[in-house]
Image (cartoon, rainbow, N blue to C red):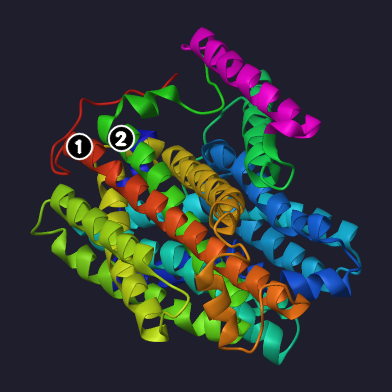
Amino acid sequence: MQAHAKTEKVYSPLERTLITIAVMSATLLQVLDTTIVNVALPHMEGALAATPDQITWVLTSYLVASAIFMPLTGYFTDRMGQKKFLLFSMGGFVATSALCGAAGNITEIVIFRLLQGVFGAALVPLSQAIMADIFPAEERGTAMALWGVGVMVGPILGPTLGGYLTEVATWRWNFYINVPIGVASMLLAAKVVPDSVKKIRKMDWKGLALLWIAIGSLQYFLDRGNQADWLHARDICLSMFLFAVSVPAFLLHAHGRRNHQGVFDPHIFLDRNFTICSCLLGLFGLGLYGGMILLPLMTEGLMNYPVLTTGLIMAPRGLSAMVSMLLVGRLLKYVDAKKLIFVGILLTGVGMYICTFYSLDISRAWLIAPIVIQGFGLGMVFVPLSAVAFSTLPAHLRAEAAGLFSLLRTIGSSIGISIVATILSRGTQHFWNQLGGRITPFNPAVANYLQSAGLTPDSPQGLTVLAHTLGMHAQMLAFINAYAFIAFCFMLMIPLVLILKRSGHSERPIQPDH
């Protein structure tokens, strides 16, 4: 009965509002930091005297650390209580953010980003568990909508905010901005966030080591694979080998400890809704983050848009997602979550499919229209998916389940980013060769194209123009292929949606380990 005590209290609307502000402001900062520095990397590269390969570790170190420590959310919540663990995570995140802003070289900022990922890892799952606890069951859709606004809109608006801060101030303010907001969030959380009952819990250190090796090697493989030409590099082969060995070793070890406490409670995955929703979230993260990196790469790299303009073009997706999530949070009381998820997937898929008709002459209006559709669809998927995942889980498993839920979103996003990067690099090379085979001095279309500029196919200037034009069209076709792949990934979600239980149906009770 102790484990269920925290769900018995009924919170007033004012209490729920203050708790929501406290936990969601911290969550927003954590998810913002996954994308806010993306557009500032070229500036950081020069300021920190780093190479292009080194500067990517600013992103990789944060993602790897976050992924490794997310599954431990339930363990530390049990040992410390959710309030103390939340404040500890907030304080560490704020301190390491300030250190990142003050970093003087590439080594310092990579170490501080690693620590920032460690402290920030629990903020998203903790906030989700707390939001699920303070709202009654009939209002859980609203709770997940408010939570989803922070988790979804943060990464989408990150490049916009990052571009603005970098342009009007300096890249260091991408980190310094966390300090005042984080401190205010901590002070409010210390006053209003409820605590949970502490439980005696031992750590399965062997299982934890195997899990860390599995997650760390997978993240390294995904984050660095494309730059290192995948399995042609020794470190990438080693990381894949470690992942292939550590995963079955962890599963065998967990199976042998069925009656003892492990890194996380395996009974969580007996809940069908949670397991299916976790798989859906992995595909969702793949499509969301894979699609997010395409637009800035295309507009800045191919169409020469300024950083701030690209950020403003991307902003409507976040606004559309916010409207969608708040609307869906209310609709969940009246409409089956499966139907909302299904419609959201179709909208997002259609939005991605429209992008396959892009060309080098596309207008800004046609850049914005599909991402508005995508944003609205993403909101319709994310909120009911989160609500259904936790609808049949008992309260004592929520913090642990939230950590695993967020981990799968992180892994899905890493897979999506890696696949999209590979499609772009390999696709550009493929189309360069395919299109280039038709460009010869004897092709009359080539001569006619250059004649309008007063050039010939055998002149140095003519060859330069042809190479530049060929490169642009090859990249554009690669972008189109990447959008088609992401649209296909969203369609893969549909069969899983069909086997979800209605959120109002209950699973058999899940018993905790003793």
Name the residue rendered at 48%, 75% in the picture.
360
Q: Quick one: 371 or 32, which is closer to the camera?
A: 371
Q: Quadrant of residue 152?
A: bottom left
Give the residues in magenta: 231-259
* Residue 484 on the magenta segment: no
- Evaluate whether residue 136 shows in this view: no
Q: Secondary structure at mark 1?
A: loop
Q: Quadrant of the C terminus?
A: top left
Q: Which mark is residue 500?
A: 1
The location of residue 376, given as percent across then percent down, is: 28, 68
Q: Which mark is residue 276?
A: 2
Marks 1 and 2 close (CB-CB < 8 Å): yes
> Which residue type does callout 2 highlight?
Ile
Name the residue rendered at 60%, 14% in the picture.
249
Name the residue rendered at 62%, 27% in the picture.
211
Q: Quadrant of residue 399?
A: top left
Q: Quadrant of the N terminus?
A: top left
Name the residue rendered at 35%, 79% in the picture.
366
In the picture, measured across the screen, residue 197 lies left or right of residue 380, that is right
Q: Earlier in the sequence, mark 1 or mark 2?
A: 2
> Which residue type does callout 1 highlight?
Leu
> Is most of the magenta stretch helix, strand or loop?
helix
